[in-house]
Image (cartoon, helix red, strand yellow):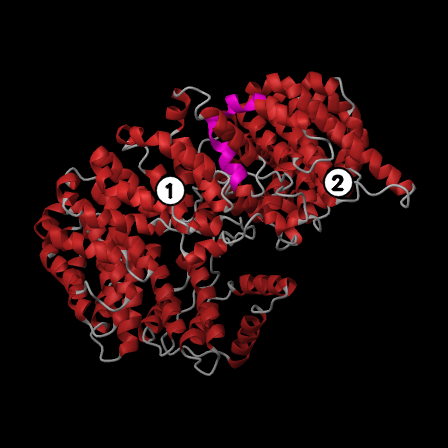
């Protein structure tokens, strides 16, 4: 927003009572759970940005309006923070000065929430390149550290810690006259402060400057290390965590300074790796991983191995919380009454087509993903994984010299009656496989049969870790006479592929070298199972992942698999028709058979590509799909639309004659109440449009309005937004004249939903569509051109002709508005966006 009128403001700014009430009302409404209200509030807040002193009101509510409740005051500060992010360079001078002085005067507010909000605001202003324009900020914050008032000291430290995290580089440059020369000695004084929170801030601030070997810190390195040692036994976990983190980083950059104290440091880290607080233990455990990469590791740790190895092995047990999250205390899932999500196909998640994400967003959005994978909580880096990784690297450092310390422990663990202990032993055995392989060979004839037995342990987590550990010793197993270990192993693995627990099935299918050996017995198992046998589910699902992984390698096995899937679909449909006609005589079929079969056909189409063409030609799959697409069960429709998209990509010549029948059905399924059905239908429409080209014209009216509506809905899940955007782009690519007139209605959400997707074919075709539509209807993009710029900048490397299209549009816009207006417009861009557009497109 460029101000029309500059207003001169002095510090004694006073709010207008009516304006203040209006803003408070908005702040209250924006806390409403109702999304419609939230959107209206959002628009009003945007409009208020046109008034130069709007931001004065926001800072006033945050810092001066003590009568208001804290959440409202904090929210006011966060809205101001967003305005600073988006429009700071357009704030009038008076407003900027007022905000800065209010921040510094209120950094010690008695409420921790308000202090933190003021701290975030200060940091955001500082990160806008303002450290140079706010010369009194750092001196003032540093002097506030000496305040008698705890709140002031803590608030100032909180802000300084954030500034050190965000602006470490500029703090160590000549631009600011090297403030760290004063700041670092100052921080070191606070390592002995009486408040644990302040001690923790102080260490965290200094830690920001270790890895970059900052000169100011290197001058005081000895007093830093001395101070760290003084905090070794601190009662506050957060302080201990920061001390461990510091020592781990110092190991990488100043090993010379730690060496004289190495014996004590190792002893200390051994204690901390067993800390009651898991976050402290995890930071400490990183020490062993980092040390193992240093050449001196072997000598330094040798005498400590008898103590260290048991500590690491102990850290490899699942914690109680892990077991709860992994439902590891549950036996087979079968015996448990089905929960809502289990009633869908057993151990089966119908196929949802999703986009790949890019790690390189220009500006990080605070997106909370709605979709949570049940395994996310555990896939994070934790003490168990860190301990296992450390043991793995140490096994590679010491090789067989490690075994005298490991073998006595293994003997105890592997045959332990408690499953958690036994499971950790199997993980230990897998972790040392690479480093200690030679020394382990004499023990394998006894251990491998034991592991094969563990494959049928009644605990799922034991079965799945055993699959992994066996894969680490696979090359030895394969080198022995097949009857000795390989055959019993294959028999057990086959059973695991049909395991009653999906985590185990996955582990059993992962070992790539087994797959070729597995296929003949798998197909044999496949032929033995009757069509009515529920054991087919995991087998179909397993074959689906095998087919996708092996691609054309699956050709020799595909015909019987394909045929059987088609038969399963046909049988289920026939049974459903009988049941509809005479429900008292014929029972309803279990449609899960049909769903899993459709998904395996999708896996085949994706894996085999064009090679599936003859199989499709010789079957009635398209007729069957036409019926499945109209089934009343959403999961059946979901899977049939996924298959339609995959067949469209693999062999469109067979799909094309049915398009006139399929398109109206796809149109009626663009109903976001059934998210996954809607998502797959949307994706299929996009794939079809690419194949149809201009012949897609008659079908645009059946789908376009629904798609535009979906992309504008609040709270639409990310996957659906992305697929909708891609499909709209593809429709516009093949039929620009039909789609371009609606450009203004979708361009903004279109750009925001595709900025985080990885460069790929789908994104490519969608952006070509948008560019083509902009050339047909340039006025449709004018209002939201900044969003288009941001989306263009999200490309890492577009193909040359697509880059030319971007260039043409950007320069066309620039020439049309003229240099001065373009400069005013592009001044609103976040810096990375500005730099990227200049570098790649010369605007």
- Look at the image and tell me whether residue 120 can be seen: yes
Residue toward you, 316 or 144: 316
Q: Is residue 371 above or below residue 520?
A: below
Q: Which residue is mark 1?
A: 427
Is 84 positioned to the left or the right of 692 in the image?
A: left
In front of the other: label 2 or label 1?
Answer: 1
Looking at the rendered structure, the secondary structure element under dot 2 is loop
Task: Kindly identify the residue that appears in the image at 79 percent across and 40 percent down.
Answer: 589
Q: Are marks 2 and 1 in contact (CB under 8 Å)?
A: no
Which mark, residue 591?
2
Question: The magenta stretch spans which residues?
Answer: 504-520
Front residue of 795 and 834? 795
Q: CA distance from mark 2 to mark 1?
A: 39 Å
The crowd level at tag 1 (other Cα within 10 Å; few <14, some 14-19, many 20+) is many
Percent from the top left, x then y, of residue 479? 38, 20
669 falls in the magenta region = no
Q: Quadrant of residue 612?
A: top right
Q: Nearer the viewer, residue 433 or 385?
A: 433
Q: Which mark is residue 568?
A: none
Q: Classify residue 467 as left or right of residue 137.
A: right
């Amino acid at each position: 927003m460029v101000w029309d009128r500059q207003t001169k403001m002095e510090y004694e700014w006073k709010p207008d009572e009516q304006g203040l009430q209006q803003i408070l009302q908005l702040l209250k409404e924006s806390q409403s759970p109702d999304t419609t209200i939230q959107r209206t509030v959002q628009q009003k807040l945007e409009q208020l940005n046109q008034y130069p002193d709007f931001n004065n009101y926001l800072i006033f509510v945050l810092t001066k309006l003590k009568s208001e409740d804290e959440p409202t005051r904090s929210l006011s500060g966060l809205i101001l923070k967003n305005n600073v992010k988006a429009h700071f360079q357009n704030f009038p001078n008076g407003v900027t000065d007022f905000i800065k002085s209010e921040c510094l005067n209120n950094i010690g507010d008695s409420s921790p929430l308000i202090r933190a909000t003021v701290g975030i605001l200060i940091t955001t202003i500082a990160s806008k390149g303002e450290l140079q324009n706010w010369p009194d900020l750092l001196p003032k914050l540093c002097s506030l550290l000496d305040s008698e008032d705890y709140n002031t000291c803590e608030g100032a430290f909180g802000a300084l810690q954030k500034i050190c995290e965000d602006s470490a580089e500029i703090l160590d440059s000549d631009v600011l006259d090297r403030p760290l020369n004063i700041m670092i000695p100052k921080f070191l004084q606070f390592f002995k402060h009486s408040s644990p929170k302040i001690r923790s801030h102080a260490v965290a601030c200094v830690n920001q400057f270790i890895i970059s070997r900052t000169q100011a810190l290197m001058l005081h390195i000895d007093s830093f290390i001395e101070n760290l040692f003084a905090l070794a036994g601190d009662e506050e976990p957060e302080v201990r965590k920061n001390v461990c983190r510091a020592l781990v980083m110092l190991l990488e950059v100043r090993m010379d300074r730690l060496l004289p104290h190495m014996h004590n440091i190792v002893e200390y880290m051994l204690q901390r790796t067993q800390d009651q607080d898991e976050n402290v233990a995890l930071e400490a455990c990183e020490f062993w991983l980092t040390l193992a990469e240093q050449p001196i590791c072997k000598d330094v740790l040798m005498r400590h191995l008898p103590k260290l190895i048991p500590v690491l092995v102990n850290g490899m047990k699942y914690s109680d919380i892990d077991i709860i999250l992994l439902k590891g205390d549950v036996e087979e899932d079968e015996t448990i009454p089905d929960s809502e999500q289990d009633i869908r196909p057993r151990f089966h998640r119908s196929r949802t087509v999703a986009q790949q994400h890019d790690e390189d967003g220009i500006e990080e959005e605070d997106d909370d993903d709605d979709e949570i994978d049940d395994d996310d909580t555990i896939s994070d880096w934790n003490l168990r994984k860190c301990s296992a990784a450390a043991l793995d690297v140490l096994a590679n450092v010491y090789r067989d010299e490690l075994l005298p310390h490991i073998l006595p422990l293994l003997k105890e663990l592997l045959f332990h009656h408690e499953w958690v202990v036994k499971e950790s032993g199997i993980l230990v055995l897998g972790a040392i496989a690479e480093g200690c392989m030679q020394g382990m060979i004499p023990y394998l004839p006894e251990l491998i049969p034991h592991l094969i037995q563990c494959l049928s342990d009644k605990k799922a987590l034991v079965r799945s870790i055993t699959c992994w550990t066996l894969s680490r010793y696979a090359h030895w197993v394969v080198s022995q006479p097949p009857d000795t270990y390989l055959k019993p192993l294959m028999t057990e693995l086959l059973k695991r592929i049909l395991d009653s627990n999906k985590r185990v099935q996955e582990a059993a299918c992962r070992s790539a070298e087994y797959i070729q050996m597995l296929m003949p017995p798998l197909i044999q198992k496949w032929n033995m199972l009757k069509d009515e046998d529920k054991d087919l589910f995991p087998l179909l699902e397993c074959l689906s992942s095998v087919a996708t992984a092996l691609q054309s390698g699956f050709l020799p096995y595909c015909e019987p698999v394909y045929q059987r899937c088609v038969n399963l679909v046909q049988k289920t449909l026939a049974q459903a028709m009988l049941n509809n006609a005479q429900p008292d005589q014929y029972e309803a079929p279990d449609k899960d058979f049909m769903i899993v079969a459709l998904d395996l056909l999708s896996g085949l189409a994706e894996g085999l590509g064009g090679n599936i063409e003859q199989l499709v030609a010789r079957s009635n799959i398209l007729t069957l799909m036409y019926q499945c697409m109209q089934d009343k069960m959403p999961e059946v429709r979901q899977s049939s639309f996924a298959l339609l998209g995959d067949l469209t990509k693999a062999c469109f010549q067979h799909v094309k004659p049915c398009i006139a029948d399929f398109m109206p059905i796809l149109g009626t399924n663009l109903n976001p109440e059934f998210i996954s059905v809607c998502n797959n239908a949307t994706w299929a429409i996009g794939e079809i449009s690419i194949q149809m080209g201009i012949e897609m014209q008659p079908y645009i009216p059946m789908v376009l309005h629904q798609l535009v509506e979906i992309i504008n809905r609040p709270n639409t899940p990310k996957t659906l937004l992305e697929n909708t955007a891609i499909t709209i782009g593809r429709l516009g690519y093949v039929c620009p004249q039909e789609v371009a007139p609606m450009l203004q209605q979708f361009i903004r959400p279109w750009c925001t939903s595709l900025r985080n997707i990885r460069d790929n074919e789908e994104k490519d075709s969608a952006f070509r569509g948008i560019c083509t539509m902009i050339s047909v209807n340039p006025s449709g993009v004018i209002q939201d051109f900044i969003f288009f710029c941001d989306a263009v900048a999200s490309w890492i490397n577009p193909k040359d002709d697509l880059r030319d299209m971007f260039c043409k549009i950007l320069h066309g816009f620039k020439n049309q508005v003229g240099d001065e207006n373009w400069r005013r417009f592009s001044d609103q861009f976040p810096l990375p966006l500005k730099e990227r557009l200049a570098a790649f497109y010369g605007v």
